[in-house]
Amino acid sequence: MKQLMYGALALGLAAGGAQAQEQSRLDTTLERGKLLCSGHNGSFLGFAEVNDQGEWTGMDIDLCKGLAASLFGQSEGNLEIVPISWAQRWPALQSGDIDVVIKLSGWTQSRDTELNLSYSQPYFVGAFHVMTHADLGAESVADLDGGSICVSAGTSTERVLASYLENNEIEAEVVVFESGDEVKTAYFNQRCDGLILFSPPLAATRATSENPEDHVILPDVLGLEPEGIIVPEGDPKWLDVMNWMLSSLWFAEINGITQANVDEVRADPGSAQVEKFLGVTPGYGERLGLSDDWAYNLIKEVGNYGEIFDRNIAEPYALPRGMNELYTNGGVFYPLTID
């Protein structure tokens, strides 16, 4: 039955994707004058959460803000964050309820080939880990054999967990919940012996718990996954905007261009490449169907990649960048060539 439902969803999304590509989502969004970007139906710490003032914050939210600024000059008045569950991501994208999925979504073969989705280059790479109650004395996931592990529905995390348990012959009950808040509440209420999440939100969940020392993140790496921005398949104009937005964040960082000094650098670029990047000379935006100062607006709005990471992940949750560093610092990210 599950396979039949999945097949029906794939066929429905394929039909929706074909209709959507009569016009690029870029043109649709510009004509509307507002970007509809994915939010979260709860809190996903470090990536999409709501602060005490009722404002959306997080790395994914900053990318939504940066994209809106790239399109319209600024995000204020031009961005709507649409709260959706993990399972709602794909139908919402294809129906036009959102324009883009920026929701820490892994690049998998089934999504790529069966659901008519296109992925940008990754903007985050991380591992899956399991957190457990310290009083259980578990030192590895294998020690949870006979127990239970909580996971969010409709995520690649669910598949990673099932595969790891099967490959390692671990008999643990997988308890599935719809929202991120539900899955964490269930774990903290002792409904599950373990909680699986992507490493940054998992570490943040532990750090912000009532008694962090009561919880242990097990050392097992259940899987490694690249996270990308997702658009409908067959829309190269829209996908180009995503890839060049990410590249621009890395270009700004590697060239020392920040939210604080971008005006100063624009007044005295120092190189033809930086001149074009900041819209002093034409070309960087026109090729994408944007204004030539779109990258300037992007950095003015959210800063470079390092600033986004530090603000949302490193500073509040004391998590290092690791492989998400620039290649010059031993990481995997690098900007594309501006010519």
Image (cartoon, helix red, strand yellow):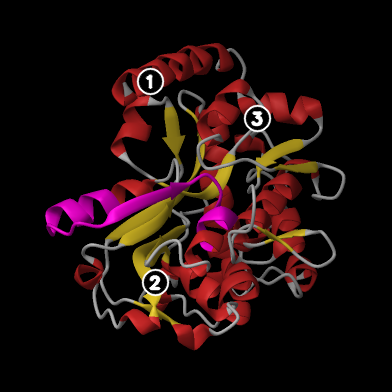
Marking on residue 5: 1
Mark 3: which secondary structure? helix
Marking on residue 111: none
Viewer-proximal residue among 167 and 16: 167
Give the image location of residue 50, x and y in percent. Answer: 73, 60
Q: How many marks?
A: 3
Marking on residue 131: 2
Residue 87 belongs to magenta span: no
In the displayed image of the protein, which residue is found farthest to the bottom? 213
Q: Earlier in the sequence, mark 3 or mark 1?
A: 1
Residue at 27% x, 62% y: name it.
222
Quadrant location of the N terminus?
top left
Query: Are dots 2 and 1 in contact, CB under 8 Å?
Result: no
Mark 2: which secondary structure? strand
Viewer-proximal residue among 61 and 247: 61
- Three-letter code for the amino acid on which mark 1 is drawn: Met
Are there few (<14), some (14-19), or many (20+) residues within 10 Å of tag 2?
many
- Three-letter code for the amino acid on which mark 2 is drawn: Met
Would you identify the image quadrant in which residue 289 lies?
top right
- Three-letter code for the amino acid on which mark 3 is drawn: Leu
Of tags 2 and 3, which is closer to the observer?
2
Q: Earlier in the sequence, mark 2 or mark 3?
A: 3
Seen in the picture, residue 291 relative to 21 is either above or below; the reply is below
Question: Would you name the residue on which mark 3 appears?
Answer: 26
Q: Which residues are magenta?
A: 161-184
Q: Is residue 35 left or right of residue 229?
A: right
Q: Earlier in the sequence, mark 2 or mark 1?
A: 1
Give the image location of residue 32, x and y in percent. Answer: 79, 27
Are there few (<14), some (14-19), or many (20+) residues within 10 Å of tag 1?
few
